[in-house]
């Protein structure tokens, strides 16, 4: 039987998923978060389906050992590749959420969106998962997608909100299918950091969907429905990484606004 005082486990290929952890910690300040960033295997976007499924399973086991009541896959690539296999693996030991379903629901319910662009890693885009789920939710919605492989590493290297990042973003968004979209899905948990630049490209005329507030609201809803909302937090958050460098810690600070100390946990050794 799950208890409200148990922590929430959040994982990503690295530190990008901290944008989601940040949104969850703001929306649900009473929840204790155990974050795991698989920095030893970053980036997931270029890995095979089987590799991402294997990594995700081992991380889920780690989070189950940490007694998490809910595991949130804060990575679009792992959500696309491993959500179904993880669901079977975890069973009823914890609740499981991905970052794709709440985004699809928010978009499908927004009747102002008729034509949509989707950007993400190679893994997410080649899975076609957003198009499939959006088509099922609202068949009339038109969607085109583009793998924007450079963006996650560009952001991690500190290139955002500057002329270099804007030039790279502009070049991707010049994709012909994106010219008359009225919405853009940021299907990578790194991309909330370049949201403003994407809005700027479209002169703030389109709606941009990212996985911060949409996901934190979805987590709140799921915990509420399951009677698992924590009413007071007694423990601090923990942030584990499978490979530690001081530069990961520095970069982590751009993704997570509160105090953050990375703990090295060599899950693969
Ligand atoms: N943050 C991951 C995602 O949302 C992408 C980074 C990676 O390729 O590992 O897909």
Image (cartoon, grey):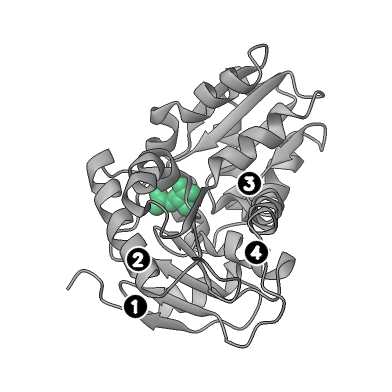
Q: Tell me where residue 202 appears, x and y as whole percent.
A: 75, 33
Q: Are marks 1 and 3 in contact (CB under 8 Å)?
A: no
**Helix, strand or loop at mark 3:** helix
Is the CB of the residue bearing disc 1 within 8 angstroms of ligand 1?
no
Instruction: Classify residue 135 by image quadrant.
Output: top right
Camera-side mark, 4 or 2: 4
Of callouts 4 and 1, the N-terminal one: 4
Distance from the alpha carbon under mark 3 to that under mark 2: 26 Å
**Helix, strand or loop at mark 2:** loop
Q: Residue at x 65, y 79 (%)?
A: 258
Instruction: Classify residue 42 by image quadrant.
Output: bottom left
Camera-side mark, 3 or 2: 2
Of callouts 1 and 3, the N-terminal one: 3
**Helix, strand or loop at mark 1:** loop
Tell me the residue that label 1 is attached to: 244
The reply, left or right, for residue 22 in relation to residue 152 is right
Of callouts 1 and 2, the N-terminal one: 2
Of callouts 4 and 2, the N-terminal one: 4
Tell me the residue that label 2 is attached to: 39
Tell me the residue that label 3 is attached to: 166
Tell me the crowding category of disc 4: few under 14, some 14 to 19, or many 20 or more residues within 10 angstroms, Cα based. Answer: many
Q: Residue furthest top?
A: 140
**Helix, strand or loop at mark 4:** helix
Of callouts 3 and 2, the N-terminal one: 2
Camera-side mark, 4 or 1: 4
Tell me the crowding category of disc 3: few under 14, some 14 to 19, or many 20 or more residues within 10 angstroms, Cα based. Answer: some
Q: Are marks 4 and 1 in contact (CB under 8 Å)?
A: no
Q: Tell me where residue 186 appears, x and y as whole percent.
A: 60, 41
Q: Quadrant of the C terminus?
A: bottom left
Is the CB of the residue bearing disc 2 within 8 angstroms of ligand 1?
no
Distance from the alpha carbon under mark 4 to that under mark 2: 21 Å
Q: Are marks 1 and 2 in contact (CB under 8 Å)?
A: yes
């Amino acid at each position: 039987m799950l208890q409200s005082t148990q922590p929430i486990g959040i994982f990503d290929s690295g530190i990008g998923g901290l944008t989601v952890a940040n949104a969850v910690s703001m929306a649900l300040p009473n929840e204790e978060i155990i974050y795991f960033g698989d920095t030893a295997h970053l980036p997931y976007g270029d890995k095979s389906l089987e590799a991402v499924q294997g990594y995700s399973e081992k991380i889920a086991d780690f989070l189950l050992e940490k007694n998490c009541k809910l595991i949130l896959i804060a990575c679009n690539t792992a959500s696309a590749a491993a959500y179904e296999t993880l669901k079977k693996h975890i069973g009823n030991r914890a609740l499981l959420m991905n970052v794709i379903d709440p985004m699809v629901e928010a978009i499908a319910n927004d009747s102002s969106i008729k034509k949509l662009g989707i950007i993400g890693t190679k893994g997410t885009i080649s899975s076609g998962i957003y198009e499939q789920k959006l088509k099922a939710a609202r068949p009339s919605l038109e969607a085109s997608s583009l793998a924007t492989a450079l963006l996650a590493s560009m952001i991690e290297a500190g290139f955002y909100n500057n002329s270099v990042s804007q030039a790279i973003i502009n070049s991707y968004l010049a994709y012909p299918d994106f010219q008359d979209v009225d919405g853009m899905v940021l299907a990578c948990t790194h991309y909330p950091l370049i949201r403003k630049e994407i809005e700027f490209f479209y002169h703030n005329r389109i709606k941009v969907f990212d996985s911060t507030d949409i996901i934190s609201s979805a987590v709140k809803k799921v915990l509420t429905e399951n009677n698992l909302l924590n009413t007071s937090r007694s423990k601090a958050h923990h942030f584990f990484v499978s490979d530690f460098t001081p530069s990961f810690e520095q970069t982590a600070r751009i993704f997570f606004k509160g105090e953050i100390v990375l703990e090295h946990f060599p899950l693969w050794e």
